[in-house]
Image: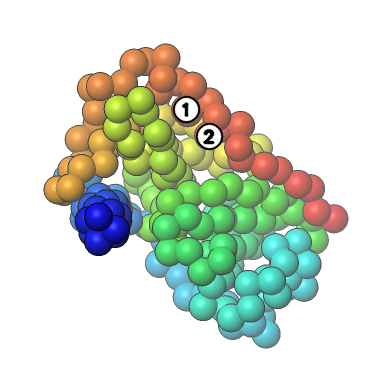
Amino acid sequence: MVAKVILSLIMALVCAVQSSFSYYENWPPYSFKQGPFKHLDLKSLPDKDIPSFIEDHSDLESYGDSEFYKVYKIDIDGNGLDDYIVLLCPMGSTFLWASDVYLQKQKGRYEKISYVSCGVGLEDFVDINKDGRYEVIIGSLYEGEKHNYITYNIYEFKNYKLINVDKKFKGFSKFVWMTNRPNDKDTVHLSTKERRKHVANKDYSIKYESIY
């Protein structure tokens, strides 16, 4: 009896892993059979070049090995000042990552934008409409009554904030049913109310902090 229970647990774990990995063909760079989108391609900064204010406000020391964080420098919002993107892997997770974006408003003054996304990477920063400005795709999980979904929403930088612009781009928002086979189709099994509530919660979860 115990052996059967253990076997059932193992099988459930295997199925869960398969469900997660079945998405990887539509994970970054988010082809969705439409692309791939043009995305950022940068080299991460060595530790010696990471500004001290980032070390203080992103608490990189708590992550120990730099294997679990990457820092990039770029003018992401096009105002002529260098910004920083910090990708953090909490507790060594390879699925749920945190991201901090430091937008430089004036010399030495930044707006820190913090959010969590599934499998975050530079591939999340995409120029979908090819206007030279990068949007950000934020992924998350939605637990429905009958099925679980991976969700994708698109944001743009405006006035030092991340603004949801799903309505501007075909295919967003996207709720993909977690299956045991590759899948990139937006589900038809969720109500508009459910979808709007999840997106609103995701918008609300983005945090801001002014740094001087």
Viewer-proximal residue, 74 or 47? 47
Name which residue lies at 31% across and 21% down. 190
On the image, the x and y values in percent for residue 28 come to 32, 56
Q: Residue furthest right?
A: 212
Q: What secondary structure is found at the residue carrying circle 1?
A: helix
On the image, the x and y values in percent for residue 7 come to 23, 59
Marks 1 and 2: CB-CB under 8 Å?
Answer: yes
Establish if 150 lies above or below 112: above
Q: Amino acid at mark 2?
A: Lys
**Which class describes the residues within 10 Å of circle 2: few (<14), some (14-19), or many (20+)?**
some
Name which residue lies at 58% across and 47% down. 115
Q: What secondary structure is found at the residue carrying circle 2?
A: helix
Q: Amino acid at mark 1?
A: His
On the image, the x and y values in percent for residue 21 come to 26, 57
- Is residue 191 something that shows in the picture? yes
- Is residue 29 something that shows in the picture? no
On the image, the x and y values in percent for residue 184 come to 21, 41
Say which residue label 2 marks: 202
Q: Quadrant of residue 191?
A: top left
**Which class describes the residues within 10 Å of circle 1: few (<14), some (14-19), or many (20+)?**
some
Q: In which quadrant is the N terminus drawn?
A: bottom left
157 lies left or right of 139? right
168 lies left or right of 106? left
Viewer-proximal residue, 32 or 148? 148
Q: Quadrant of residue 170?
A: top left
Q: In which quadrant is the C terminus drawn?
A: bottom right
Say which residue label 1 marks: 198
Disc 1 from disc 2: Cα separation: 6 Å
**Residue 173 numbered mark, or none:** none
